[in-house]
């Protein structure tokens, strides 16, 4: 039995099989709903259930943070026809057409003590489209996946750049730092996610990133520059210590070269040897201090879920319309060794 899912307010609909996650069905039918982790932990795919009944494939860890009428599309399955309120993104060429492919490690370069820049090369014959800001999954041999934002743009294809932070007890990230080498073969799935620049407004852009949440921001800024877009862009980058600003010089140079790019690095725990003269504190708090009229911006937030959720909560309370907040919360996946 196939169920029909009606989306509001767009009045689009899609069909879903029993036991098929709603998000999977929507993406297959080229309807781009917001999502990130696809595993029930980040909350990015949250939607309001207006009518009908759902069940979950597995209990989502984010469930306790949902209101009574909210569901997570990545794990919810239909028990009846459904009516759902969720923001539907105008789909752009190819970005819901996910592909799996092998790729070769082209280059590894340490950007800081615990961030590795990893360049992958996809097969030359692969015709791939993605939007700057989307992410990919690395498919591990045991069936698990590790998600990383793409830090490069389609102009760099067949090369793809990732920024990988070393995670204690994260077997894959340790492999990246300790044993992965040039010419090794990995399997990837891409493009994934709905985090990319919307062009339906000319409001200035406010990027807020934590740590390697800079990766999709880098891609989006480079894409905007390549397309000669001159929208005002303000980038707040929150990290702990100065050495964590692993591409500080690149961004500083962008801000010098392009008058519409502004860069504000923020350290939450500056070290004495940093002799830091810049902003300190939590990045969302610094944004709130600096920008009284958030409603005049479109916000793109990327980083650990707690940072993204806190920024969302405070920015909305300050008057930012929910439709002007896009996010890419990501978990640093830990493995059992
Ligand atoms: S909780 Fe559904 S995409 Fe993260």
Image (tube, rainbow, N blue to C red):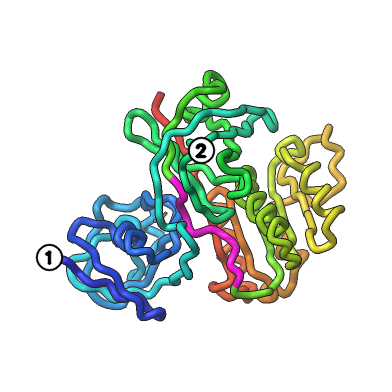
Residue under numbered circle 2? 124
Residue 43 placed where, x, y %? 43, 58
Q: Residue at x 12, y 65 (%)?
A: 1
Q: Is 52 drawn above or below residue 75 in the view shown?
A: below
Q: Is 304 drawn above or below residue 206 in the view shown?
A: above
Residue under numbered circle 1? 1
Residue 329 visible in rendering = no
Neighbour tally class for label 1: few under 14, some 14-19, many 20 plus, Cα within 10 Å = few
Front position in the image: 27 or 38: 27
Q: Quadrant of residue 117?
A: top right
Q: Residue at x 77, y 65 (%)?
A: 290
Front position in the image: 293 or 13: 13
Q: Secondary structure at mark 1?
A: loop
Q: Is 85 drawn above or below residue 165 in the view shown?
A: below
Ligand 1 image-quadrant field: bottom left
Q: Residue at x 85, y 54 (%)?
A: 257
Span colored in magenta: 190-199
What's the magenta bit mostly, secondary-structure-wise? loop
């Amino acid at each position: 039995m196939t169920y029909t899912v009606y989306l509001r307010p767009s009045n689009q609909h899609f069909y879903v099989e029993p036991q098929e996650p709603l998000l999977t069905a929507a993406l297959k039918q080229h309807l781009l709903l917001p999502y990130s982790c696809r595993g029930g932990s980040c909350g990015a795919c949250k939607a309001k259930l207006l009518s009908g009944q759902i069940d979950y494939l597995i209990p989502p860890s984010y469930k306790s943070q949902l209101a009574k009428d909210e569901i997570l599309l990545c794990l919810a399955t239909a028990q009846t026809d459904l009516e759902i309120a969720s923001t539907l993104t105008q789909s752009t060429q190819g970005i819901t057409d996910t592909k799996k492919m092998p790729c070769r490690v082209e280059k590894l370069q340490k950007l800081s003590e615990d961030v590795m820049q990893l360049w992958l090369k996809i097969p030359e014959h692969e015709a791939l489209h993605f939007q700057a800001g989307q992410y990919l999954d690395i498919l591990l041999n045991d069936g698990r996946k590790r998600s990383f934002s793409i830090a490069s743009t389609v102009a760099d294809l067949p090369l793809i750049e990732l920024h990988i932070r070393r995670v204690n007890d994260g077997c894959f990230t340790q492999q990246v730092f300790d044993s992965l080498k040039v010419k090794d073969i990995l399997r990837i799935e891409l493009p994934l996610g709905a985090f990319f620049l919307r062009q339906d407004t000319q409001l200035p852009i406010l990027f807020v990133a934590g740590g390697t949440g800079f990766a999709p921001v880098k891609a989006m800024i480079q894409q905007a520059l390549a397309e000669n877009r001159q929208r005002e862009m303000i980038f707040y980058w929150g990290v702990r210590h100065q050495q964590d600003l692993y591409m500080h010089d690149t961004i500083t140079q962008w801000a010098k070269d392009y008058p519409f790019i502004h860069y504000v690095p923020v350290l939450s725990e500056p070290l004495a040897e940093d002799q830091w003269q810049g902003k300190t504190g939590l990045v969302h708090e610094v944004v709130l201090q600096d920008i009284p009229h958030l409603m005049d911006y479109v916000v793109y937030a990327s980083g650990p879920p707690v940072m993204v959720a806190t920024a969302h909560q405070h920015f909305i309370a300050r008057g930012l319309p929910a439709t002007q907040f896009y996010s890419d919360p990501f978990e640093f996946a830990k493995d059992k060794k």
